[in-house]
Amino acid sequence: MDSPAANAAFAKQVNVKFTLLSDMNKKMLTSYGILKGYDVQSESYQWAQRANIVIDKNGIVQHIEEGDSAVNPNNALSVCTDLHKKQTAK
C-alpha cells in the first residue's frame, strides 16, 4: 500500500537492491489475500499484512512469507539468489 517513494526509502534503509512493489490500488494485496480489514467505532480500515512474495520471471510464485518474519527482506533476497543460481546452472 506504500508509495513507490516510501518503498524506495525502506529498501535503502534495509540495504536491498531489488525493487519493492508499490500496490497503492490494492489489486495485488487483494489477489494474494494479504489485505486485511478491521472496524473501529463504525469505521472500516484496511491494512496490508507484511509479506515477501518472490515471483520468478515466468510468473510463478516461488516463495511467500507473511507476518513478523517478513520484516526482513533478506529472506526474499536469499530465495532470489538461489533461483538465480539454479537458472544459471541449467
Image: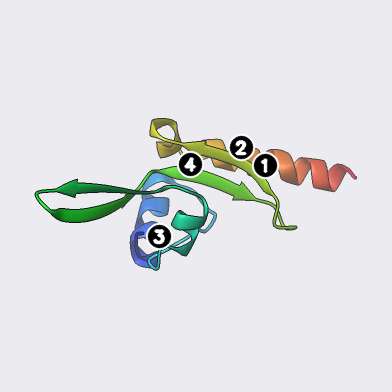
The numbered dot on residue 73 is: 4
Amino acid type, mark 4: Pro
Percent position (x, y) of residue 55?
A: 64, 51
Amino acid type, mark 3: Ala
> CB of mark 4 within 8 Å of CB of mark 2?
no
Q: Quadrant of the C terminus?
A: top right
* First in residue order: circle 4 vs circle 1: 4
- For the point 43% across and 31% down, the residue is 69
Which quadrant of the figure has residue 67?
top left
Tag 4's secondary structure?
A: loop
Q: Which colouring convention does the figure follow?
A: rainbow
Q: Is residue 52 left or right of residue 42?
A: right
Percent position (x, y) of residue 15?
A: 45, 47
> CB of mark 1 within 8 Å of CB of mark 2?
yes
> Considering depth in this image, is 88 or 66 the residue closer to the camera?
66
Amino acid type, mark 1: Thr
Count every numbered label the image shows and give the total.
Answer: 4
Tag 1's secondary structure?
A: helix
> Considering depth in this image, is 57 or 74 the residue closer to the camera?
57
Tag 2's secondary structure?
A: helix
* First in residue order: circle 1 vs circle 3: 3
> Considering depth in this image, is 39 or 11 the residue closer to the camera?
39
Residue 5, compared with residue 87, is above or below; it is below
Q: Is residue 50 left or right of residue 60?
A: left
Which quadrant of the figure has residue 8?
bottom left
Residue under circle 2?
78
In three-dimensional space, the C-alpha distance between marks 4 and 1, rounded to whole angstroms, equals 12 Å
* First in residue order: circle 3 vs circle 4: 3
Residue under circle 1?
81
